[in-house]
Image (cartoon, rainbow, N blue to C red):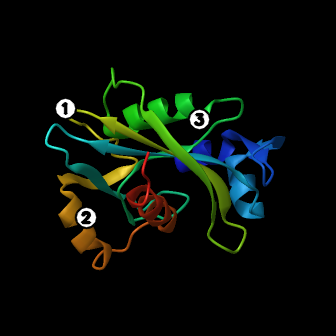
Amino acid sequence: MSAASAADEILDVVDEHDRVVGQAPRGEVYARGLRHRCVFVQVRDARGRIFVHRRTAGKLVFPSLYDMFVGGVVGAGESYDDAALREAEEELGVSGLGRPRFLFKFLYDGGGGRTWWSAVYEARWEGAVRPQVEEVAWFDFLTEEEVGRRLGEWEWVPDGVAAYERLRGYAG
């Protein structure tokens, strides 16, 4: 999806209790700092390593930063579960991924009007991946220890770090 068409995608606008209060194009949601919904899917390979990638420079939010989740915004009228599967398959460039397992949801507040409900999932993919070149500039599967070391070295998306920290403390 090009940046122009991404900006035109219609999203649900939600309140502090995650109730839909309206709809607006993604570009307007971002520009006005309207609360919306996102999904974060931590994908592991057969060896338990985490899919990590660097976002492309053309992304509307957090361009060129590293992320330990695949995911994105939830479209208007779309469920979190459906968005998690769609986004994971799109970003990994695969089909036939089992439905990601929902873990928890939290309200991310990055300040300056950057706030969104964030549903965190996990999934396993044991085949080859072909990430979207529009979304992913670099990728690899890293061990938990490698991710931990890189947290202090690389510039990561802040909402992903917030989700990762919560996930590490999650008892399930």
In this orientation, which residue lies closer to the viewer: 96 or 134?
96
Residue 1 visible within the image:
no
Between discs 2 and 1, the one toward the N terminus? 1
Q: Residue furthest front?
A: 171
Determine the residue positioned at 67% across, 74% down: 111
In this orientation, which residue lies closer to the viewer: 9 or 94?
94
Q: Quadrant of residue 152?
A: bottom left
Are discs 2 and 3 less than 8 Å apart at CB?
Answer: no
In this figure, which residue is indicated by the disc labeled 2?
Answer: 147
Between discs 2 and 3, the one toward the N terminus? 3
Q: Position of residue 30 (x, y in %)?
A: 69, 58
Q: Quadrant of residue 110?
A: bottom right
Spatial distance from mark 2 to mark 3, Cα to Cα?
Answer: 26 Å
Spatial distance from mark 1 to mark 3, Cα to Cα?
Answer: 23 Å
Q: Position of residue 5 (x, y in %)?
A: 60, 42
In this figure, which residue is indicated by the disc labeled 3?
Answer: 80
Which amino acid is tagged 1? Answer: Glu
Q: Secondary structure at mark 1?
A: loop
Q: Residue furthest left?
A: 47
Q: Quadrant of the C terminus?
A: top left
Between discs 1 and 3, the one toward the N terminus? 3
Which amino acid is tagged 3? Answer: Tyr
Q: Is residue 85 left or right of residue 96?
A: right
Q: Which mark is residue 126?
A: 1
Q: Which mark is residue 159?
A: none
Q: Callout 2 environment at 10 Å: few (<14), some (14 to 19), or many (20+)?
A: some
Q: Position of residue 156 (x, y in %)?
A: 39, 69
Please tell me whether residue 73 is drawn above or below residue 63 in the rendered image.
above
